Every structure is written in C-alpha cells, then in structure tokens.
C-alpha cells in the first residue's frame, strides 16, 4: 500500500510540475518502442537500395571495374553499408534520387573507383533561339544522369504518334520544354534544344515516374512502348564524333507492390530477382507479359553503350529478341 501511495503521489507531483510528464512516465516503454520503430529503415526504400546495387552490378562496364575486388554479394553488402552510413532511408526521396545519391557517393566509397560515377554522367548544352527577337542563347553545360520521363506522357504521346519508336517519343517529350527569352522586355517562350557535344556516357539511364495506381491496361500501354535498344543520337542532338551511339538495355529497377525487383538480361534471357529469389522470365515479350500480369512498374532503365560490338543473330532490337 505504501508503494502504491508513493507512486500516486509521484504522479500527482509530476502532473503539477508538467501536465504531460505523468503521461510520459507511464508510457515510457511504449514511447521507446515507437522511437525504435521510427528509426528502422523504410522497408520499401531498403528494398530499392539493394535492387539498385544489384542492377548496377549487372552492367558489365560497371562490374568489370570491381571483379578483382568483389563478388556480387560482397559488392552489394559493402556498398549498402557505406550508403546507409551516409544517408537516411527515412527521407522521402524517390528511387531515382536514391540512385543519384549512390552515384555521387561512389568517389567517397573507394577513391580507386571514382571513374565509376563518370560512366553515368551526361553533359548537355541547352540552346534556344527566340522566334520574336531572334536572340540566340546558349547555356552552360548541365550535368545529369539521364532523362526523367512521366509514364503517362509516354502513353499520351504514343496515342498521338502511333508510328514513333521509343527513342523518338523521348525526343518529342523532351523538346516540349519551353523557356522564356532572356532579353529584357521580350520574354517570349521558346522551345529548347538539348545538345551533347562531349564524350558519350558508358551507361545511359532513363527514369520513369509512375502514379502507382495504374491499371493493367495503363501498365501495358506504357511498357509496350519501351525498347531494348536505343540510339542516343535520336533522343538528343549529338555533335560528337563517336559512331557508337547505340545502347542496349541491360538491367531495370522495377517496383512490384511495395518491393523492388531487378530484371536483367543474362545469357540470352531476362532474369527477375526479387527478395532472395531468382526467376527466369525468358524473352522480351515475356517480360512485357510479366509487367502486366504482376503489375510491375519499371522505374529505372540502364542502357549500356554497344561500342561497336558485333551483334549476331541474337541481337536485341526494338521490343523483341531475334
């Protein structure tokens, strides 16, 4: 009884000093548990991190720089720990932002691997000529890791221009960017031309932004536009001297439900990695079927430069394997 009386007196004293203190005192354990829960990495973003790392490993030009030091599992484990120590997975950034963060952290991970980041860098010059005052404007080089495309835009433009290929649709979408004239008093909005006159990247990345509530029909209409080979000179105006402007799709970061999957092209077939499982999908048409059947949304597509490799009878062409 004395103990109960003392406890009651303590609560009353707490309440007088701080009206909230007695509540905190009673719920201390629950509060601690809540804090622990909030500190846990978001499961979906943790899945995104692992999937991005696995997808990067599937890019041969990226992987060959690391093969002498790591196996795939060692690479994912070590870089994951490094990334987690430098960012919070609780931050509400998208999967593409997470990829950019990883690429920008690479030079700090191991100084010997600094060139890895540069393999993804795209430098574009924006040019604009005003239709009203004829002022030519050229902006400084801009660094990016590839275009970000709204999935709905692909569907809408494909519906309007049925005969256009994936790369041509990307070009049309990107040329819809308009900026006001820089001349004081004019300010007429004009279309902007994107020009690449620097060395081409080893990897060309395309990000797709989804609403996450698409129907099967909308997923089909979007993914059916995708291609497994693109020519970067058809997407951007290329003024360089390289003849190797074609890229092959080698891996993708995809969202399925609340978990991310890696889909990569290995040994003449597409493979799906999800959780700790591995599943053979088959050819590209089977991949498109899986997108719809499982409601998989590809969010990051990694295209690797062909660099003049001889493409045999099993080469990847637009939308299929032949």
Image (cartoon, rainbow, N blue to C red):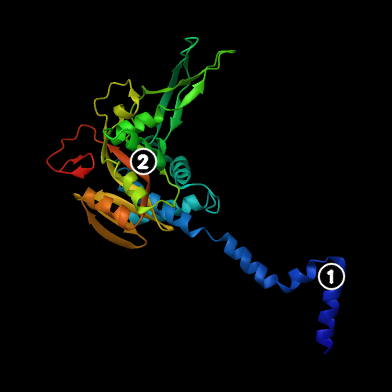
Residue 112 seen in this snapshot? no
- Residue on which disc 1 sits: 15
Could you tell me which residue is drawn at 40 percent across and 35 percent down?
A: 147
Of callouts 2 and 1, which one flags the residue occurring earlier in the amino acid sequence?
1
Disc 2 vs disc 1: Cβ atoms closer than 8 Å? no
Q: Which x, y percent locates residue 55? A: 34, 49
Q: Tell me if 88 is positioned left or right of 124 in this view.
A: right
Could you tell me which residue is drawn at 31 percent across and 47 percent down?
A: 251
60, above or below 157, in the image:
below
Q: Tell me if 81 is positioned left or right of 203 in this view.
A: right
Q: Which x, y percent locates residue 137? A: 48, 15
9, above or below 85, in the image:
below
Residue 310 seen in this snapshot? yes
* Neighbourhood count class around disc 2 (C-alpha, 10 Å): few under 14, some 14–19, many 20 upward: many
Look at discs 2 and 1 and give the one toward the viewer: 2
Disc number placed over residue 54 in the picture, else none: none
- Residue on which disc 2 sits: 155
Q: Which x, y percent locates residue 293? A: 31, 57
Q: Tell me if 16 is positioned left or right of 286 in this view.
A: right
The quadrant of the picture occupied by the C terminus is top left
**Foreground residue among 98 and 219:** 219
């Amino acid at each position: 009884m004395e103990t109960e009386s003392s406890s009651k007196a303590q609560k009353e004293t707490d309440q007088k000093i701080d009206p909230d203190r007695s509540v905190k005192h009673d719920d201390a354990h629950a509060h601690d548990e809540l804090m622990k829960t909030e500190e846990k990495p978001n499961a979906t973003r943790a899945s995104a991190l692992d999937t991005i790392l696995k997808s990067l490993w599937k890019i041969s030009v990226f992987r060959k720089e690391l093969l002498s030091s790591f196996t795939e599992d060692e690479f994912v484990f070590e870089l994951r720990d490094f990334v987690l120590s430098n960012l919070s997975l609780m931050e509400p950034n998208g999967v593409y932002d997470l990829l950019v963060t990883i690429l920008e952290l690479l030079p700090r991970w191991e100084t010997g691997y600094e060139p890895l980041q540069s393999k993804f860098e795209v430098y574009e010059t924006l040019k604009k000529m005003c239709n009203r005052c004829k002022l030519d404007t050229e902006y400084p080089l801009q660094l990016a890791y590839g275009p970000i495309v709204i999935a709905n835009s692909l569907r809408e433009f494909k519906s309007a221009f049925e005969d256009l290929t994936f790369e041509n649709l990307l070009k049309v979408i990107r040329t819809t960017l308009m900026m006001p004239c820089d001349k004081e008093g004019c300010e007429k909005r004009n279309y902007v031309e994107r020009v690449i006159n620097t060395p081409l990247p080893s990897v060309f990345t395309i990000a797709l932004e989804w609403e996450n509530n698409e129907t099967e029909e909308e997923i089909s209409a979007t993914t059916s536009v995708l291609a497994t080979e693109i020519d970067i000179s058809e997407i951007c105006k290329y003024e360089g001297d390289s003849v190797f402007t074609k890229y092959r799709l080698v891996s993708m970061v995809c969202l399925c439900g609340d978990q991310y999957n890696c889909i990569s092209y290995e040994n003449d077939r597409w493979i799906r990695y999800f959780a700790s499982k591995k599943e053979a999908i088959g050819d590209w048409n089977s991949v498109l079927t899986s997108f719809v059947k499982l409601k998989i949304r590809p969010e990051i597509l990694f295209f690797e430069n062909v660099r003049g490799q001889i493409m045999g009878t099993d080469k990847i062409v637009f939308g299929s394997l032949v």
